[in-house]
Amino acid sequence: MKSTKIINFDIKGDERGSLAAIEQLKDIPFEIKRVYYIFDTQENFVRGKHAHTQLEQVLICVSGNCKVKLDNGKEQEIIELKGRNQGLFIGIMIWREMYDFSKDCVLLVLASEYYDEKEYIRDYNEFLKEVK
Ligand code: TYD
C-alpha cells in the first residue's frame, strides 16, 4: 500500500545472540523525535484506530507479535509484525488498528514528531472525508 512499507533491518548475530541497530535517516526515512512502546496489552483489545495528519512512524515488534490493519480509505491490508528485523513504516493519512497482541508483545514505535493530539484523526468517517 502506498505510504506504507516494510523495512528490513540488518541483524548482527554471533554465538552470543543478535543485535539490531537503527539509525535515523539511514534505516528509517525521518528524524526520530519520539520513541514509545506498547506492552502488557490485554487480550481482545484493539489499539490505534486513528490516522495522523503530520506524523510518520515505524512500528517494530521487539518481543512477541501483533497484527496491524492499514487502511488508506480505498484499500485495506493486514500486516503481521513478528520478525525482529522488521519495521513497518506508516506515512500520513493511513488509518491503523493494532490487535491480536501476544502476551509478550512489546511494540516499539519510532515517531517523526512530538506527541500532539491535534494532528490525530480519531473518527473514521472524518478520516474518510479528509483522505479523499
Ligand atoms: P493512544 O493514542 O490511545 O494509544 P494507541 O494509539 O496505542 O491506541 O494513547 C494512550 C494514552 O497515551 C493517551 O492518553 C495519550 C497518551 N500518549 C502520550 O501521552 N504520548 C504519546 O506519545 C502517545 C503515543 C500517547
Image: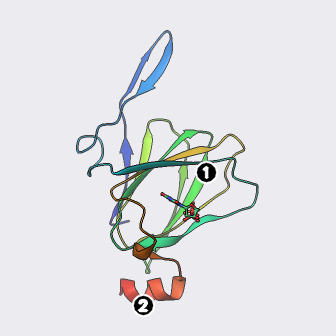
Residue 66 location (% of width, % of height): 61, 51
Q: Secondary structure at mark 2?
A: helix
Residue located 50% across and 11% down the image? 16
Residue located 51% across and 16% down the image? 17
Residue 91 image-quadrant placement: bottom left
Q: Residues within 10 Å of mark 1 (few under 14, many from 20)?
A: many
Taking the image as shown, residue 81 lies to the left or right of residue 34, namely right
Q: Is residue 13 above or below residue 129?
A: above
What is the three-letter code of the residue carrying label 1?
Cys
User: Tag count in the figure?
Assistant: 2
Q: Secondary structure at mark 1?
A: strand
Look at mark 2 in the image and give the residue it sits on: 129
Taking the image as shown, residue 110 lies to the left or right of residue 64, namely left
Look at mark 1 in the image and give the residue it sits on: 66
Residue 26 location (% of width, % of height): 23, 41
Q: Of 25 and 13, which appears nearest the observer?
A: 25
